[in-house]
Image (cartoon, rainbow, N blue to C red):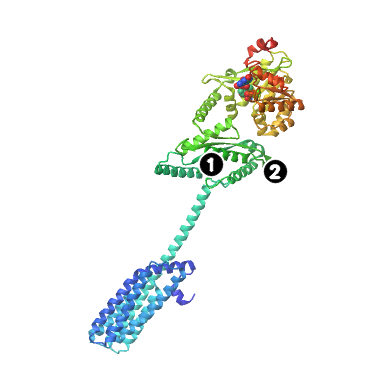
C-alpha cells in the first residue's frame, strides 16, 4: 500500500478498508452542502467587496464560474446520494473527490491571490480573512477524508504564507506565520479526530464480526436444539413449534375465510411395536442403528406437506398439512407402517418390527396442539390394542374406549388375582366320535369396581402393563387344579399370551407352575396366537420347543386372522391349528370362507396336525364343516364356557347326551 493510499485509508484488512470508505463517504455526504455553502457564500462576499475595484473578469466572471461549478457539484452530490455504489465505484469516487478538492483549492487560491492587489487595505484584509476562514471551514468539512483535508490545507496555506512572507510587510508576515501555526494546529486536530474516526469504524467492524459470530453460533445452537441427534429428524421441541405455527395459520385462515369445512391439518404419532425387545436382545448400538434406519425410511416418505419428527425413544410424530382426507391419511399410514415392517438387515444382525399409528384430524379431534396430540395418542393406543401394525384415526368413541381401558388398567393393578380371577371351561369335541377331547380354559374377571370384564378387554391391558405373567401363573394354577379333578383322558387347553413366550423368565414361571400342579404335562395343550411368532420368531420357537420337551402340546390359535402363513406352521413344533370363528359365521353360505377352511383342513391333514374349528354355533355350520372334512369343533352349539363346578356334571359324566 502506497503512502498516499495509507493517508487516505489507514486500515490494513480489505474488509476494514471497504468499511472505512463507506463510513467516510456517508459522513462526507452530510458535509457536502455545508462545504459548498461556505465556499459560495465567502466567495460571493469577496467578489462583492471587490466588484468596484477589481477588473470585471476577476470580480464577476471568475467567481461566477467558480460558484456555478460549486453549485453543479452540490447538485450532482445530492442526486447521487441515494445511488448504491459498489466497493470499486466508491473507491473511485473518493479518489476523484481528493483530486477535485486539490484542483478547486488551487483555483480558489489563485483567484484570491490575484484579487489581493486590488482595492484598499480593507479589501485586502478581506481577501486574507476569506482565505483563512474558507480553508479552515472547508478543511473541517473534509475532516472524514484525511488526505483531502491535508492536501487542501497545504494547497491553500503554503502559497498563502509564501505570498505574504514575500511582501516584507511585518504585519502580513506575522499573519502568515500566525496562519501557518493555526494551520499546523488544525491539521493536528484533524489527524487526532481522524484517528478516532477510524478506530470507531474498526471497532464497529469488530463488533459486527462478533455479532455475526454470535448469530452463527446461536443459529447452530438453534439447529442443534431442534434436531434429533440420532436420526437427524426434527425433534420434539421442533415438532411442537411447527404444530403451533401451523395451527395458528389454520385458525387465522379459518377466521378470514369463515370456511366451515376443515382446512387440512392432521397430526400422527407412530410407535414402534417390538423395538424394546430388539433393544433388549441386540443391545443399544443395534437399537440405535435400527432407529436411524427407521428415520431414513420415514423421511423418504415425507414431502413438503408431510413432516416427520422423532418425539421420543421409539416414537415419531407426523404433521400433515393440505389434503388430509381420511382415505389419504389411512393410505399414508399404511405406507409408513409398511416401510417399518420391512426387515432391518444390518451388518451384524437382522430384525423385524411393526408400527402402529394414530392420527388426530384438525379441527374434529381438537383445536389446540395439546388436544390434538392427546387424541393422536388415544388413536395410537387404540391401534395398539385393536389394530396392531395398523393406522387409526381418532374418533370420540376411541376416547371413551381408552378411558375404559385406563380404568381397567387401574383396577387390574389393584386386583387380587387369586380372589377376582376365575376360569370357565368350554369343550372341544371330536364330532366324528362324539368324544370330548379337551376343555379350553377361559379367564373370567369379576372386578369389585368394574364388575365383570371380558378377557378380550383385560388380557391386552395386562399384557401392556406387564401384569400378564402374574396373571398367567394364577390362571394356569387354577386351571390345572381343576384339571386334576377330571378323568385322566380329558385334556386342558390353556391360552398363553405372546409375552409369556417372548419375555425372559416368563416361560420358566409357566413351566414351574405346570410341574408343581401334579397334572401330567402331556394332558395340556398350550394355545398361542401368531402375534408371539411375529414379534420374535426365534425366541417363540425356543419357548415352544421347551414346552414340547416338557411333554405338552401346542395349538396355534386364531389361525387365519393375521399374518401366519402355511409356511410358518410347517416350521413350528405345532400339534393343532385352531381356525378362527370368523370363518365359520357364513360357512354354509359363503364360498370364499368355505374355500379357506377347506384349504386349512387339507393342510392340517397333510402335515398330520389336528384342525379345530372354533365358534360353531349352528347345526348347519357343523354340517357344512363336516362336509369339508373338519371333525374337531368348539362353539356354543356344543357348549358355552361354564364354571369348573359344572364341567363334570354337564360334560364328563354325560358327554354323549350333549351331542
Ligand atoms: P380365544 O382363545 O379365541 O377363545 C375363544 C373365545 O370365543 C372365547 O371368548 C369364547 O367364549 C368364545 N366362543 C366360544 N364359542 C363361541 C361361539 O360359538 N360363538 C362365539 N361368538 N364365541 C364363542 P372369551 O372367553 O371372551 O375369550 C376371549 C379371548 O380372550 C380368548 O380368545 C383369548 O384370546 C383370550 N383369553 C381368554 N382367557 C385367557 C387366558 O386365560 N389367558 C390368555 N392369555 N388369554 C385368554
Ligand atoms: Ca384360545
Ligand atoms: Ca381362538
Q: Earlier in the sequence, mark 2 or mark 1?
A: 1
Answer with left or right where residue 498 lies relative to residue 246.
right
**Residue 515 shows in this picture:** no
Question: Secondary structure under badge 1?
Answer: strand
Image quadrant in which the C terminus is located? top right
Answer with left or right where residue 615 lies relative to residue 35.
right
Crowd class of label 2 (few under 14; some 14 to 19; many from 20; radius 10 Å): few
Q: Is residue 224 above or below residue 367?
A: below
Q: Is residue 366 above or below residue 427?
A: below
What residue would you read off at disc 2? 348
Crowd class of label 1 (few under 14; some 14 to 19; many from 20; radius 10 Å): many
Relative image position of residue 262 (x, y in whole percent) = 46, 39
Question: Secondary structure under badge 2?
Answer: loop
Badge 2 residue CB within 8 Å of ligand 1: no
Relative image position of residue 193 (x, y in whole percent) = 37, 70
What residue would you read off at disc 1? 318
Q: Is residue 359 above or below residue 658?
A: below
**Residue 65 shows in this picture:** yes
The label shown at residue 581 is: none
- Place residue 51 in its image quadrant: bottom left
Amino acid at each position: 500500500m502506497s503512502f498516499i493510499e495509507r493517508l487516505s485509508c489507514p486500515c490494513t484488512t480489505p474488509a476494514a478498508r471497504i468499511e472505512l470508505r463507506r463510513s467516510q463517504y456517508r459522513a462526507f455526504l452530510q458535509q457536502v452542502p455545508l462545504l459548498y455553502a461556505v465556499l459560495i457564500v465567502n466567495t460571493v462576499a469577496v467578489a462583492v467587496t471587490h466588484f468596484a475595484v477589481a477588473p470585471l473578469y476577476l470580480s464577476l466572471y471568475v467567481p461566477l464560474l467558480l460558484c456555478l461549478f460549486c453549485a453543479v457539484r452540490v447538485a450532482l452530490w445530492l442526486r447521487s446520494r441515494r445511488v448504491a455504489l459498489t466497493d470499486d465505484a466508491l473507491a473511485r469516487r473518493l479518489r476523484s473527490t481528493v483530486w477535485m478538492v486539490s484542483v478547486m483549492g488551487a483555483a480558489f487560491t489563485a483567484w484570491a491571490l490575484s484579487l489581493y492587489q486590488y482595492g484598499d487595505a480593507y479589501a485586502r484584509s478581506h481577501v486574507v480573512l476569506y482565505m483563512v476562514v474558507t480553508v479552515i471551514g472547508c478543511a473541517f468539512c473534509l475532516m472524514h477524508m484525511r488526505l483531502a483535508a491535508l492536501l487542501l490545507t497545504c494547497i491553500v496555506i503554503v502559497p498563502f504564507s509564501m505570498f505574504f512572507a514575500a511582501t516584507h510587510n511585518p504585519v502580513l508576515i506575522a499573519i502568515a506565520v500566525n496562519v501557518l501555526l493555526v494551520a499546523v494546529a488544525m491539521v493536528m486536530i484533524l489527524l487526532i479526530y481522524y484517528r478516532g474516526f477510524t478506530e470507531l469504524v474498526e471497532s464497529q467492524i469488530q463488533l459486527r464480526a462478533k455479532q455475526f459470530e454470535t448469530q452463527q453460533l446461536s443459529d447452530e445452537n438453534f439447529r442443534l436444539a431442534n434436531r434429533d441427534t440420532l436420526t437427524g429428524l426434527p425433534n420434539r421441541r421442533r415438532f411442537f413449534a411447527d404444530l403451533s405455527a401451523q395451527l395458528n395459520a389454520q385458525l387465522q385462515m379459518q377466521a378470514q375465510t369463515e370456511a366451515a369445512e376443515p382446512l387440512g391439518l392432521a397430526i400422527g404419532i407412530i410407535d414402534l411395536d417390538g423395538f424394546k425387545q430388539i433393544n433388549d436382545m441386540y443391545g443399544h448400538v443395534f437399537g440405535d442403528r435400527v432407529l436411524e434406519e427407521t428415520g431414513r425410511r420415514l423421511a423418504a416418505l415425507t414431502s413438503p406437506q408431510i413432516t416427520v419428527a422423532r418425539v421420543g425413544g421409539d416414537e415419531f410424530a407426523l404433521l400433515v398439512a393440505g389434503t388430509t382426507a381420511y382415505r389419504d391419511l389411512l393410505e399414508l399410514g399404511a405406507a409408513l407402517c409398511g416401510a417399518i415392517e420391512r426387515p432391518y438387515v444390518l451388518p451384524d444382525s437382522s430384525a423385524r418390527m411393526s408400527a402402529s399409528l394414530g392420527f388426530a384430524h384438525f379441527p374434529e379431534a381438537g383445536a389446540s396442539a395439546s388436544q390434538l396430540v392427546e387424541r393422536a395418542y388415544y388413536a395410537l393406543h387404540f391401534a395398539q390394542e385393536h389394530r396392531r401394525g395398523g393406522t387409526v384415526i381418532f374418533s370420540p368413541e376411541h376416547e371413551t374406549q381408552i378411558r375404559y381401558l385406563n380404568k381397567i388398567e387401574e383396577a387390574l393393578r389393584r386386583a387380587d388375582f387369586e380372589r377376582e380371577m376365575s376360569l370357565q371351561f368350554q369343550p372341544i369335541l371330536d364330532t366324528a366320535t362324539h368324544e370330548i377331547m379337551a376343555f379350553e380354559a377361559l379367564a373370567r374377571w369379576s372386578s369389585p369396581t368394574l364388575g365383570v370384564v371380558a378377557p378380550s378387554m383385560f388380557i391386552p391391558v395386562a399384557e401392556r402393563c406387564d401384569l400378564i405373567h402374574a396373571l398367567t401363573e394364577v390362571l394356569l394354577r387354577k386351571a390345572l387344579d381343576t384339571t386334576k379333578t377330571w378323568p385322566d383322558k380329558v385334556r386342558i387347553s390353556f391360552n398363553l399370551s405372546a409375552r409369556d413366550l417372548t419375555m425372559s423368565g416368563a416361560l420358566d414361571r409357566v413351566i414351574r407352575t405346570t410341574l408343581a400342579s401334579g397334572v401330567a404335562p402331556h394332558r395340556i395343550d398350550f394355545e398361542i396366537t401368531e402375534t408371539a411368532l411375529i414379534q420374535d420368531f426365534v425366541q417363540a420357537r425356543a419357548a415352544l420347543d421347551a414346552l414340547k420337551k416338557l411333554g405338552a402340546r401346542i395349538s396355534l390359535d386364531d389361525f387365519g386372522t393375521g399374518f401366519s402363513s402355511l409356511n410358518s406352521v410347517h416350521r413350528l413344533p405345532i400339534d393343532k391349528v385352531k381356525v378362527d370363528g370368523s370363518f365359520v359365521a357364513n360357512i354354509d353360505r359363503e364360498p370364499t370362507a368355505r374355500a379357506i377352511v377347506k384349504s386349512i383342513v387339507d393342510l392340517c391333514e397333510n402335515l398330520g396336525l389336528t384342525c379345530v374349528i372354533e365358534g360353531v354355533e349352528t347345526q348347519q355350520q357343523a354340517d357344512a364343516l363336516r362336509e369339508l372334512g373338519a371333525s374337531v369343533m368348539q362353539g356354543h352349539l356344543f357348549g358355552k364356557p361354564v364354571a369348573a363346578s359344572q364341567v363334570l356334571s354337564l360334560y364328563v359324566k354325560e358327554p354323549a347326551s350333549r351331542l
